[in-house]
Amino acid sequence: MRNIKKFKMISKKLKGNYLFWVSLIILCLIIIAWFLYFRIQEDNWMRNSQGMYEEHGNPAIMPDYVAIQKNAINCAYEKYNLAKLNGTIFNSQCLGTCGEYAVDIVSSPRNEEDNKIENQCKAYRIGSVKKFIELDKEGKLLLVHE
């Protein structure tokens, strides 16, 4: 009888330890799975100092917001090149809009002329677009503001 009680006590201790270790292993597996899931889902697009999205790592897809920005930047370059072909002399001025972005020509570095309201795009001033792209007088991208 005494041996049976001892056996039951040892059995309970082992059972408690067994459940502890199994629970710990399951918890570790859940934490690892959670980390891997969110690591894989990481947003692999980051903004550089100019506000332009760049790849970070090796993203599988390009999100819509990145594609919209890239299309707007290409449109801004096209507007600049078209204006240049037409003989436009660039000062601080608006070139128009590209989607949800206003395209502005500014000095590099910026000066007071760039801050005058008449040199900012009307669409931006009245709020019909909330984002803008700044190019310098040579057509180089200075800033994408979102």
Image (cartoon, rainbow, N blue to C red):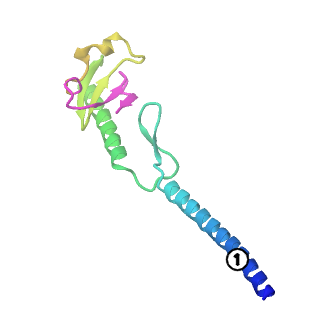
Quadrant including the N terminus: bottom right
Q: Position of residue 54 (x, y in %)?
A: 45, 42
- What span is colored magenta in the figure? 124-146
Residue located 22% across and 15% down the image:
118
> What residue is rendered at 37% in x and 31% in y?
144
Residue for point 23% across, 32% down = 129
Q: Is residue 131 magenta?
A: yes
> Residue most toward the right?
3
**Residue 70 on image: x %, y %:** 35, 41
Query: Any magenta on residue 83?
Result: no
Left or right of 43 on screen, residue 17? right
Outermost residue, top direction? 112
Who is closer to the viewer here, 66 or 108? 66
Task: Point out the image quarter for the C terminus.
Answer: top left
Quadrant of the image occupied by residue 18: bottom right
Callout 1 amino acid: Lys
Along the line of sight, the residue nearer the viewer: 92 or 32: 32
Horizontal side of residue 133 vs 50, given as left or right: left
Circle 1 is placed at which residue position?
12
Which residue occupies 61% across, 68% down? Answer: 23
